[in-house]
Image (cartoon, rainbow, N blue to C red):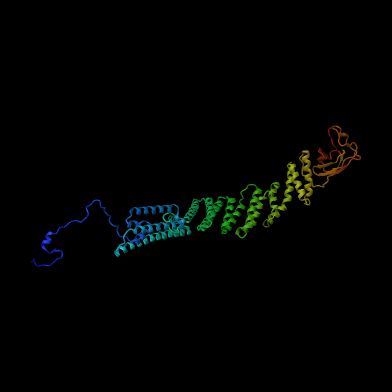
Amino acid sequence: MGGTPGTWSPDGADRPEAVARQEWFDDTPTDPRLPVLPPPPPARSRAAAVLLNLTGIGLGYAYLGRRVRAWVAAVVVVALVLIAYSIDAAESPRLWLAVAVVWLAALALDAHRLAARHPRPHDRSARTRPVLAGALAVVVVAGAYAGYGLAGRAARADATAAQAAGDCATATAGFDAVTGPYRLAPGADVAGARRARVECEDYQRAVESRQGDLHPRAVAGFLRFRQDHPDSVLGPFARENLVESYAAWARELTEDQRLDHAVVVYRDLVEEEPSFRPEAARTYLLLARTPSSTEPVERAREAVDALLVVVDEFGDTPAAAEVPGALDAAYAEATAPYPRGEFCNALPPLEHFAELTHQATEKVAGEARGALPRAVLECGLGQLREGRSGNAVTTLERFVATYPGHGDAAQARSALISAKVAVGTGARLPVPAPLGAAGPVRVTFYNGVNAPVSVRVAGSTAHEFDLPACPSCPPSFAPGTGGAACSSFAGLPGHTVGLNAGEHHVLGEYLSATDLAEPLDAGGGPDLYCIYLVRAS
């Protein structure tokens, strides 16, 4: 059988009749009961997923198409950061390092597990580029945190340097940055920054007191600062301000003539800064020259005490050379009544100076001891003249007891007799001649009772003697019968004294009472004087 010449095809497709009979059909199953299979997951690199999740913010989940997990991871990271801020995670670095390691490890393991469900990319570039992106993301996150840490440490270092320079305004801003934005930086030392900030606050508060001339408050503030922060780098600045506050306060008190307060402040200042010793000594010298008290003795005591402080504690200052002259001036001022003849007023300051034993007071103390006997005697004599016989007795007894060998002892004893007679009789008596002086009028005194009697006779002269008891005489006489006493002077105890003409007063004192106080007109009556005791039965 013949045909059209041409190329042969096994399936006869080259035959015209075969082409004409060819039919096309769709071999896709049409049975609705057969399942529709999902498309296979896209190829993903496990290494890339792990690296992206090691950033800690769930980028690996986004790479794997797990959006919910990516959002959850982001929310957890934000929550951890907020918690870390609220509890100062930098103060517990080991704990939060463990938390970070656990969190990153969990993200990495989960990313690896999920990536295992994806086929691996066959194309080299599809495998390499995600891994490089993951590594870059890890480097960026790690670098960012490292830069954050460096910035935190720099802020801390700058704040510390500013504080060490005394610039608390700059330091406070730096410490606020450490305790605020940089509080999660490694090595932030948030607690230390807070302590340093408190130091600056306390220091600034004390400095502000100085600006208002509130010297006591400033001193108290700097002292409190040093007590509360003994090791602070601000210590030298606090001390400098403390010294300046002390000095300003002491000078202000000195200008206001409140010298007793000024020297107290100067003592604290000198203890803090010895270079102010000359200034403090000068203030003590001013206090000695202008004491605060109006009482002479107290003024003298204040002056001497202040001058002795200069000698004992500031002997190497120029003020010490002025102490002798100041002591002389204080002595002259205190004892000014003495040269004016106001001996009783001169006694207290003289006594004060006479009791001084310091080597620096030898001169004034010697002068006081030399003047004191005369002052005591003249005071007692003046009291007797003025009729203050009770005071005269006390003063003259002191002279007799203190200066028994003094050249005026006889005068003091005669005046003491007159003072005692004046107290007992109520009479006002003159100062008598010294004891032992006898007048031309001879008077004999007799005791007419059986009891010893002490007799004092005072007028222009003074005498004191004792009469023993008369053994043969009655112990006393009834009122109105005393005329029988001394009816005869034979055998009666007697004592004769020489009196000047004129009125004298006689005081007889028995053991139990003063029973005789009578005037005696020497030279105008009998030269015999009977003393007896009258008692009511």
Residue 212 horizontal/vertical position (percent): 49, 50
Looking at the image, is 362 positioned above or below residue 419?
below
Looking at the image, is 339 positioned above or below residue 149?
above
Of residues 374 and 248, the one nearer the viewer is 248
Of residues 417 and 527, the one nearer the viewer is 417
Residue 428 horizontal/vertical position (percent): 76, 40
In-image side of 271 versus 493 (left or right): left
Residue 207 horizontal/vertical position (percent): 49, 53
Judge whether residue 73 can be spotted in this image. Answer: yes
In-image side of 442 versus 302 (left or right): right
Judge whether residue 441 can be spotted in this image. Answer: no
In-image side of 361 versus 178 (left or right): right
In-image side of 287 versus 395 (left or right): left
**Who's the residue at 12% across and 59% down the image?**
21
Furthest toward the right, the residue is 490
Of residues 458 and 32, the one nearer the viewer is 32
Of residues 263 and 508, the one nearer the viewer is 263
Looking at the image, is 428 positioned above or below residue 42?
above
Quarter of the figure that contains the C terminus: top right
Total labels drawn: 0
**Who's the residue at 75% across and 45% down the image?**
394
Quarter of the figure that contains the N terminus: bottom left
Residue 74 horizontal/vertical position (percent): 37, 54
